[in-house]
């Protein structure tokens, strides 16, 4: 059975099985131009499971050559928020165990977020978003 989309929007493939929760593997590839299909077990892209916001953070970080101040400006967020987004991205990619030049790589606690709001380094809107991300 072949599924053809008649619009330009492509959907991201899920990374986890909706039935058992185990990791899904790419086993079929198809060409939409000629209908050719390949079957097998193919390596997936570790970045493909990232959300559009995570991909944007990664793109801005790479384009700015790792300058978090530039990430902050481009994304329109505070420095602590830019740093948290990068930390969350590293965690999602399984890279959070690497040394961070003495800086903490753990997300801030609720109290730390509230302290940043009190100090004026984080807007209430950004704090609300961060607190929602923390669960």
Image (cartoon, rainbow, N blue to C red):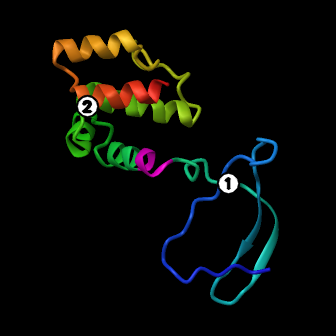
Query: Was residue 23 drawn as part of the magenta stretch in this picture?
Result: no
Q: Which mark is residue 115?
A: none
Front position among marks 2 and 1: 2
Left or right: 69 in relation to 132? left
Helix, strand or loop for the magenta stretch, by majority: helix
The foreground one among 111 and 54 is 111
Query: Was residue 52 drawn as part of the magenta stretch in this picture?
Result: yes
The foreground one among 124 and 86 is 124
The residue that label 2 is drawn on is: 125
Write the start and end of the magenta stretch as one range. 51-55
Which residue is pictured at 37% across the width and 27% down the height?
A: 130
The image quadrant where one finds the N terminus is bottom right
Residue 98: x percent and y percent?
52, 23
Q: Which mark is residue 44?
A: 1
The CA span between labels 2 and 1 is 36 Å
> Badge 2: how crowded within 10 Å, few (<14), some, or many (20+)?
few
Left or right: 84 in relation to 25? left
Which residue is pictured at 38% across the width and 49% down the height?
A: 56
Residue 89: x percent and y percent?
47, 36
Res 121 quadrant in image: top left
Q: Is residue 74 above or below residue 92?
A: below
């Amino acid at each position: 059975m072949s599924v053809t989309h008649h619009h330009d929007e492509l959907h991201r493939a899920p990374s986890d099985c909706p039935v058992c929760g185990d990791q899904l593997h790419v086993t079929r590839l198809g060409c939409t131009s000629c209908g050719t299909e390949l079957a097998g077990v193919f390596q997936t892209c570790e970045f493909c499971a990232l959300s559009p916001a995570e991909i944007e953070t990664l793109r801005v970080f790479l384009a700015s050559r790792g300058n978090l101040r530039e990430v902050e400006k481009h994304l329109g967020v505070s420095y602590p928020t830019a740093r948290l987004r990068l930390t969350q991205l590293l965690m999602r990619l399984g890279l959070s165990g690497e040394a961070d030049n003495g800086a903490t790589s753990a997300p801030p606690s609720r109290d730390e977020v509230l302290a940043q709001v009190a100090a004026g380094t984080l807007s209430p809107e950004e704090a609300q978003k961060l607190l929602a991300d923390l669960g």
